[in-house]
Amino acid sequence: MGIASLTERFRYHPAATPGRAEQHNDVRASLLRVAQDLNDVVPEGREKALMLTKLEEAMFWANAAVARQGD
């Protein structure tokens, strides 16, 4: 992997437009609703902790996709 590719992956990607900022908000709101719904159903324990971690990861990757999309 080249330096340019690594730099692009690790640099800060601000919301370039109000529409992108809204996409980030939509991603966060959607996954928060899922987390809240499942929090009420899933018993406490390691599996629940992993579930919440994976939802956070999904939020990260969805927001990375929004931030890294071409103009």
Image: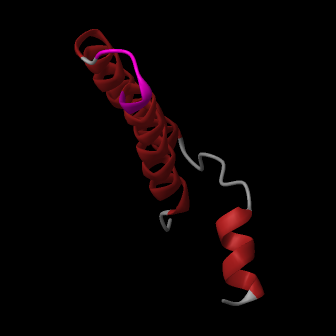
Q: How many marks?
A: 0
Answer with the quarter of the image where residue 37 lies. top left
Decide whether residue 44 is among the magenta residues. Answer: yes
Q: Nearer the viewer, residue 32 or 65?
A: 32
- Residue at point 42% right, 49% down? 62
What colouring style does the render use? secondary structure
Residue 27 lies, with reference to residue 16, above or below; the image says: above
Q: Nearer the viewer, residue 27 or 61?
A: 61
Residue 14 lies, with reference to residue 65, above or below; the image says: above
Residue 26 lies, with reference to residue 63, above or below; the image says: above
Tell me the quarter of the image containing the N terminus.
Answer: bottom right
Decide whether residue 14 is among the magenta residues. Answer: no
- Prevailing SS of the magenta stretch: loop
The image shows residue 10 at horizontal and vertical percentages of 71, 63
Residue at the extreme bottom of the image, as rendered: 2
Residue at the extreme front of the image, as rendered: 45
Give the magenta-colored segment's residue range: 43-47
- Residue at point 55% right, 45% down? 17
Q: Nearer the viewer, residue 53 or 56?
A: 53
